[in-house]
Amino acid sequence: MSGTAIGLIGFGGLLGLLALRVHIGVAMFIAGAGIYLTINDGQSAALLFTLNNLTFARLSNYDLSVIPLFLLMGQFATHGGLSKALFKAAGALIGHWRGGLAMASTAACAAFGAICGSSLATAATMGQVALPELQRHGYSGRLATGTLAASGTLGILIPPSVPLVVYAVLTQESIGKLFVAAVVPGILAALGYLAVIALIVRRDPAAGPASAPVPWGERLRAQINVLPVALVFLVVIVGIYDGWANPTEAASIGAAACGIIAALSGGLRWPQLVASLYGTAQATAMIFLVLIGADLLNSALAVSQMPVELAAWVRDSGMPPLLVLFTIIGVYILLGCVMDSLAMILLTIPIFYPMVMGLEFFGLSVADKSVWFGILALMVVEIGLVHPPVGMNLYVINRLAKGVPMRETALGVLPFLASDLLRILLLVFCPGVCLWLVRVIGG
């Protein structure tokens, strides 16, 4: 049996394990070990040697220390009450519009995503803050839950983003470039969601009634209260890309700043500090387990030559590059039914990345293609978090929304998915949407 055939069978076995609900990290370990043992006729020496080296190489990688720091920054924001301040600021500004509180939820999710980096955390945190207010003001369950489920995905699209950090590590790409490239698509995503809400309440005003206007003095105070959050975002992004701080240093500054802001606001006491540290450790351990499993699987696939053979086959098949790209997008959407965003990035990038780099798209250089495909993959992965029937954000929000059937949440998110698809088409045919700011800042 050829190495490529062994690799394909191993990959198929991995998908079978995932269908049986085996943890993604464990499933990758099993599939990678199986490929190694098959190629080496059952001898375990190569497997153990590789696992030993891969584990040390991965866990001693300085760049990966940015992940727990960004997670800690999000934990401080969550437990320190910054999410409430963000929602209050947005609600004070536009809550008196029709659908204004739903729009405020989207704006707050985008701002929270700028200091969090996780979609599930953004959806869960902002859901706890915004859902009671939306329900109290008479918003329909469909609009309220659909808005929060979709807007939660801004947590990974607005930098800093943990999946983007992982993509950068896997492809040896610049974290700073990826963060800057995600800014414009993230803003477009938020604006698209705001437009969807406006269209919904225009068609059905009862779905999102306006709330009472807030006095201007209170509006101003609410905006001033969230200025430190904007400052943290600017320090992290500008610091990384401008070169005066590497990603780990910028993340350290951001985490410390969020902790100080939360403590000064009175939201971060000893119990919240302990909960933040515990949550960070738990999430970091899970991510690193998946990373090591992915390393073993990717090494096994490299030994089997499957990714190289598939990339060569795609390159020589004569298939139009855009057809290959849309096929990859379709695969991502299907995978969103069975796994989360980080797992999809880890599982697919070693296979899809060589394919895309070997094809010609609009005259882009390899460096530009790498950044463009990273943002595109992130946006498609984001859809997997909310598309029915098993988008993870749907379940997070629906569990918080007492009395709202899952069917209503699924129907509520469909208009936002239409906005996502339009944005993906825009990015596919106009790569400059994500590359423009990189070129401007980079000179």
Image (cartoon, rainbow, N blue to C red):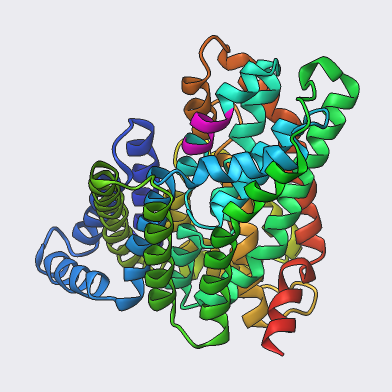
Q: Residue at x 80, y 24 (%)?
A: 210
Quadrant of the rendering where the N terminus is positioned:
bottom left
Q: Is residue 178 above or below residue 228?
A: below
Residue nearest the viewer, comparing 156 with 273: 273
- Say left or right for 367 vs 292: right
| Above or below: residue 144 compared with residue 215 | above
Q: In this view, does 140 lie above or below 238?
A: above
Q: Is residue 291 magenta?
A: no
Identify which residue is drawn at 64% across, 81% down: 366
The magenta segment? 125-130
Please, which residue is most extreme toward the bottom here? 443
What percent of the width, then of the height, locates residue 105?
65, 37
| Quarter that holds the C terminus | bottom right
Q: Front-most of 37 and 355?
A: 355
Q: In which quarter of the view is residue 181 placed?
A: bottom right
**Taking the image as drawn, is residue 199 in sight?**
yes
Rendering coords of residue 352 (x, y %): 54, 62
Percent coordinates x, y for residue 347 in the rendering: 43, 55
Apparent side of residue 190 relative to residue 296 in the rendered image (left or right): right
Q: Is residue 2 visible?
A: no
Residue at the front extreme of this rendering: 217
Q: Farthest top residue? A: 403
In terms of secondary structure, what is the magenta stretch mainly? helix
